[in-house]
Image (spheres, rainbow, N blue to C red):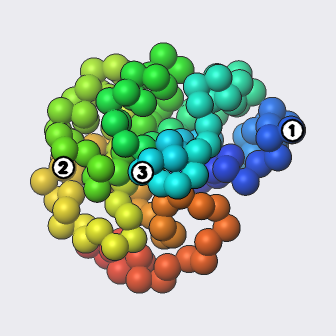
Amino acid sequence: MLVAPSILSADFGQLSNDVIAICEGGCDYVHIDVMDGHFVPNLTIGPVVVEAVAKASSKPLDIHLMVENNNFFVDLFAPLKPEFISFHIEEEKHPHRLIQKIRSLGIRPAITLNPHTPPEAIEYLLEDVDMVLLMSVNPGFGGQSFIPSVIEKTKN
């Protein structure tokens, strides 16, 4: 099992200290939730903040895009060389093309499923991605209650 704590609930006034603390605490990745205010109602972190996180982190970055226009955001974050960039299948019209683009940039592609999306929606992509992120809450807000039915998806 690998641990990738999200910085979404970090104290942004102390972001560097929080990132250092989770790295020293033994995390495997630093998970960064990017929200654009369109795919989800909230707006979060941009490349300037991610660059600061990368400087503070001794662990690789895992960027989770909760956005419309994935290509734009991949281009925006690729120069920061995260280990993973994940995108939501619910938003991407050409997932194979995006997966190939992410990989061509030297980044490991990952795909994300919302709680309501069946695993069958990505069966044809599993050989092409390096990780699948199963959302156990609806995307867009921190502090939500866990959706237990998501556990069933892990059995497929």
Q: Along the horizontal axis of the image, is 122 left or right of 66? A: left
Q: Which residue corresponds to the image point at 75% horizontal and 38% vertical from the top-left?
A: 19
Q: Which residue corresponds to the image point at 42% horizontal and 37% vertical from the top-left?
A: 85
For marks 3 and 2 on the same chain, the one whose residue lies earlier in the sequence: 3
Q: Quadrant of residue 48?
A: top right
The residue type indicated by label 3 comes to Phe
For marks 3 and 1 on the same chain, the one whose residue lies earlier in the sequence: 1
Q: Is residue 127 above or below residue 20?
A: below
Q: 145 or 40, which is in the foreground?
A: 40
Marks 3/2: CA–CA distance: 22 Å
Mark 1 lies on a secondary structure that is: helix
Can residue 145 be seen by looking at this rendering? yes
Q: Which residue corresponds to the image point at 45% horizontal and 48% vertical from the top-left?
A: 38
State the image coordinates of residue 107 (x, y, percent, origin top left): 39, 27
Residue at the disc numbered 2: 125
Question: Which label sits in the foreground, 3 or 1?
Answer: 3
State the image coordinates of residue 125 (x, y, percent, origin top left): 18, 49
Q: Is residue 43 above or below residue 40?
A: above
Q: Is residue 71 above or below residue 8?
A: above
Q: Which residue corresponds to the image point at 60% horizontal and 77% vertical from the top-left?
A: 145
Residue at the disc numbered 3: 39
State the image coordinates of residue 49 (x, y, percent, origin top left): 67, 29
Can residue 33 be seen by looking at this rendering? no
Marks 2/1: CA–CA distance: 38 Å
Q: Quadrant of residue 17?
A: top right
Residue at the disc numbered 1: 14
Q: Along the horizontal axis of the image, is 108 left or right of 126? A: right
